[in-house]
Amino acid sequence: QSVLTQPPSASGTPGQRVTISCSGSSSNIGSNYVYWYQQFPGAAPKFLIYRNNQRPSGVPDRFSGSKSGTSASLAISGLRSEDEADYYCAAWDDSLSGVFGGGTKLTVL
Amino acid sequence: EVQLVQSGAEVKKPGESLRISCKGSGYSFPYYWIGWVRQMPGKGLEWMGIIYPGDSDTRYSPSFQGQVTISADKSISTAYLQWSSLKASDTAMYYCARAPQLWELPYYWGQGTLVTVSS
């Protein structure tokens, strides 16, 4: 059972906008930054969003993050087939440990 | 360029000990936290713990406290994850990853080390 809650799956058609939610608590998302990672099969995770809504260089602006209270979301606009991957939210917890969501498998129909 | 290069895949028997490594380059190794993350086959990411190589300050996830040992040798820019007695349930991919500060999650990740424990 993951500390952060994500839907197990999401889907969309090319060009569509998709959002993935992430729910936590006051000890993690509510008081710390949220991060998002993208993982392709057989590959290491790649960081996509840091500090709630910041994109590292090289990440397209089609990807955006937001946070409100104890929840966060990742939005992908202009969906492309190459966006098909697993997406994980994560945050630091006040118990001095990182915590992850269970992951969301994004399918591009 | 920041790089984290992990040691190669391991196949071990239950009860054996193991230490895997993660070598950092392209940055000042002692001054960034190195975290370890487990991914069991077909499952999600799990936080194991984190170490500051500068002074070896280490914090473990409650789920992994006492199950593994995290260490680092700043003189050779390498962090380690160690088991004293492996179990079949330790079979997983293990990633090291660099975080800028203790209360932040990692930005840069190693390529992963696959550990298989089987009799």
Image (cartoon, helix red, strand yellow):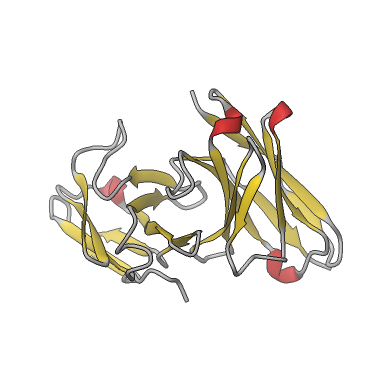
Q: Position of residue B98 (x, y in %)?
A: 52, 40
Image quarter of residue A11: bottom left
Q: Of A100 and A78, which appears nearest the observer?
A: A100
Q: Name the residue located 53 percent from the left edge and 36 percent from the top edge.
A: B32
Query: Could you tell whether A68 is left or right of B66 in the image?
Result: left
Residue reaching furthest to the bottom: A1
Q: Residue at x 37, y 63 (%)?
A: A28
Q: Is residue B5 above or below residue A62?
A: above
> In the rendering, at what x and y percent does residue B101 appear?
46, 42
Pick the residue in front: A27 or B78: A27
Q: Position of residue B69 (x, y in %)?
A: 73, 55
- Horizontal side of B5 relative to A10 (left or right) equals right
How many discs appear?
0
Residue B34: x and y in percent read 57, 43
Task: Name the quarter where the C terminus of chain B is drawn.
Answer: bottom right
Residue displayed at 82% across by 58% down? B12
Camera-nearest residue between A23 and A12: A23
> Is B102 located above or below residue B62 in the figure?
above
B59 or A35, nearer to the observer:
B59
What residue is drawn where x is 59% and y is 30%? B29
Position of B71 compared to B47: left or right?
right
Indicate the quadrant where residue B26 lies. top right
